[in-house]
Amino acid sequence: MENWKKAYFCNMVASISRTTEILKRNNVTVTDIRRQVIALLLEPGRALTQKEIEIALEEMSGSVDRVTLYRTIKVLLKHEVIHKITIDEQTIKYKLAEVHKKSDHPHFHCASCDKLVCMPQIQIEQNILPDGYLMQSSNLVIEGVCAICNTKSKHKK
Ligand SMILES: [Zn+2]
Ligand SMILES: [Zn+2]
């Protein structure tokens, strides 16, 4: 079993109160699948595709209703519990929102450990565009190597 899945199974047991609290704090009705999806994303920096969430839930409970999962993700997005991050045309990942609710900030993707980190300190605003241009949305992903992986690779040399 992959490491993140192992961590998830441990998290699932420890995190019932945490996932319930996150849902309540965001005024979302608590259901099992909503709690399970959040439990999957509790680890800081973890972002998963819908498919990855589906596979993990399947391994845990045997079967997952795709429509229910799709709706669950929609509800969590609407209440800004999770961020939707477009990596490329084929890959859309979901990440637990932190203190910043809005998801219009850039994200940093570590090519080494696959971590996705919110970068709310970088603001993409209308006024950085040339005169007359109108911003509708932005999906900026900065590719690179995170501090932890960067240190590790330096030690190897
Ligand atoms: Zn990394
Ligand atoms: Zn974010």
Image (tube, rainbow, N blue to C red):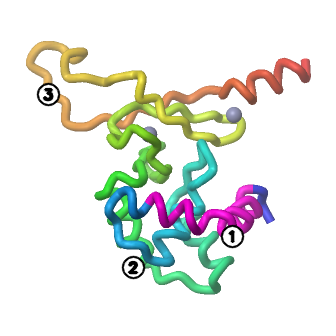
Select label 3 or label 1 by which is in front.
1
Residue at 72% across, 56% down: 4
- Tell me: residue 97, above or below residue 67: above
Q: CA distance from mark 3 to mark 2?
A: 35 Å
Kindly indicate the quadrant of the structure image that contains residue 3: bottom right
Q: What residue does disc 2 label? A: 67
Task: Give the residue type that dot 2 points to.
Answer: Val
Q: Amino acid at mark 3?
A: Leu
* Mark closer to the chain start, 3 or 2: 2
> Residue, x 49% and y 75% (percent of image)?
33
Residue 134 is marked as 3
- Residue 136, x across and y down, in percent: 19, 36
Q: Which residues are magenta?
A: 4-22
Q: Are marks 3 and 2 in contact (CB under 8 Å)?
A: no
- The amino acid type of the residue labelled 1 equals Val
* Label 2 close to label 1 by CB (< 8 Å): no
**Vertical comparison of 46 with 141: above or below:** below
Which element type, helix, strand or loop, lies under badge 2?
A: helix
Q: Nearer the viewer, mark 2 or mark 1?
A: 1
Was residue 40 drawn as part of the magenta stretch in this picture?
A: no
Q: Quadrant of residue 117?
A: top right
Marks 3 and 1 in Cβ contact (< 8 Å): no
The residue sitting at the left extreme is: 132
Residue picked out by circle 1: 13
132 up-or-down from 62: above or below: above
Badge number at residue 4? none
Say if the magenta span includes residue 11.
yes
Image position, residue 120 (x, y; %): 41, 29
**In this rendering, position of residue 71 left or right of residue 38:** left
Local secondary structure at mark 3: loop
